[in-house]
Image (spheres, grey):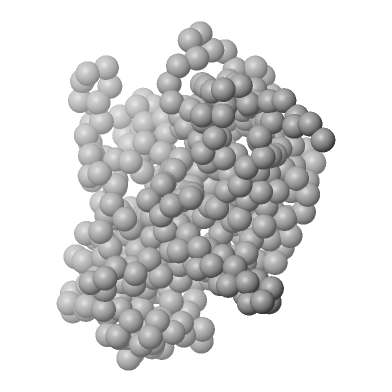
Amino acid sequence: MPKEAGVKDTSMVIAIDNGNSFVKAAFDQLDNILMIPNVIVPSEMKRKVILNQGTPIDNLDIEIVSPALPEGVGRNFHVGILASRNARAQSILGHRAAQMKSQRTETMITTLTMLAFATAMKNQQAISAGVRRLRADVQLGIGLPIAEVAEAAVLEARLTSGVHTVVFKSTPGLEGVSVELSVSLPDGVNVDNVAGIIDLASDPKSTLADKSFGVADLGGIDLDIAFFKPGLELDDYTSTGFRINLNDIVSRIRKDFNASVGQEYLTSDVNVVDRLVHKEYEVRWQGLVKGNISDIANLHLTELARDVLERVFDAWAAAPEAEEFLFIGGGSVILSSYLKELDRQGHPLRFDRPELAQLRNVRGTYRSLIAALQTGAEVAATEAD
């Protein structure tokens, strides 16, 4: 049968972490990382483009046809940086934050977008040569908070039932390219902060496998707490999860600052997160300094850190043999200084490196996925013999 012109069959091995502020993906190798703000805006009107310039990842303008999307949500979306430029776009909060990650339509949209974009990036040369349609078999690793592990089968069923089609619209260099995704989850759905520990423990200098310890994964909405025994054995009994809604705090900081100066100088929660992560508190507008968010941020973040620390110590009391406590996740980068200051007794609190804290889960999920695929291949080879 002759090969269909303009079509390429391909494959992808990819891990995705749908963080509440950012969506991260690692594909084909551990350090091949994509990251976009977790922001989506429905876009039924054709985007006005004067010069279709800029990087593709900053201009994700897509159409999705998928059995995993409920009726009524539409098919056309701006995702990530492009969506964050829209005045209507904010991070996941309020009633959307109350929904489980596994049940949010946003989770499915960002997951499918990342899968399609990674596939397109892997096949850039073919696209440049005229390929307009990619058919991808995807091996996916994806995580859920501890409190949602029971929903893993439901999420997996949505991802693996049928073919998902993502078409890039005005995205530079990808206009009109469609990606058909057939997804399988060889490693099932991982628990987020367990995956992060897999990556931390993989460091040759790590001594985590030799001790008992606790870990808190601080995200934009969820606080996952887990305890491990020597040998990296997860203690299911003491591991737990909470809602902390850091995203709500970020939105409050933005609104309080704008109210204090009487003008909407901060228009995006994504911009506020970036300021908090990089400790850049001064707000400039048209080249002039219009204020500083540090006092407002300190007020809100101190209260949030106090709540986080109280929950950590309560959980630690149920596993007092843990020798130290680790904080990972993007929220730990923002709250680390507040947590240290509030811990008056000098507990052995440890904080991940800022440049890796929010990537631990996706890196650990990728490691788990590769291990599962290798194990599956070995089993298949044994059965064939």
Location of residue 57 in the rendering, given as x and y in whole percent from the top left corner: 47, 32
Of all residues, the one furthest to the right in this rendering is 1
Picture layout, residue 261 above or below residue 235: above
Residue depicted at 44% across the width and 84% down the height? 233
Residue 110 visible? The answer is no
Q: Quadrant of the C terminus?
A: bottom right
Q: Quadrant of the N terminus?
A: top right
Residue 302, picture quadrant: bottom left
Location of residue 203 in the rendering, given as x and y in whole percent from the top left corner: 29, 68
Observer-nearest of 44 and 368: 368
Q: Is residue 223 shown left or right of residue 2?
A: left
Q: Is residue 53 shown left or right of residue 285?
A: right
Picture layout, residue 89 above or below residue 47: below
Residue 372, picture quadrant: bottom right
Residue 152 visible? The answer is yes
Residue depicted at 22% across the width and 59% down the height? 337
Of all residues, the one furthest to the bottom in this rendering is 321
Residue depicted at 57% across the width and 13% down the height? 48
Of all residues, the one furthest to the top in this rendering is 50
Location of residue 350 in the rendering, given as x and y in whole percent from the top left corner: 24, 70
Observer-nearest of 337 and 165: 165
Q: How many marks?
A: 0
Q: Is residue 95 shown left or right of residue 309?
A: right
Observer-nearest of 302 and 178: 178
Q: Is residue 229 shown left or right of residue 346?
A: right
Residue depicted at 45% across the width and 71% down the height? 194
Location of residue 229 in the rendering, given as x and y in whole percent from the top left corner: 39, 87
Picture layout, residue 303 above or below residue 22: below
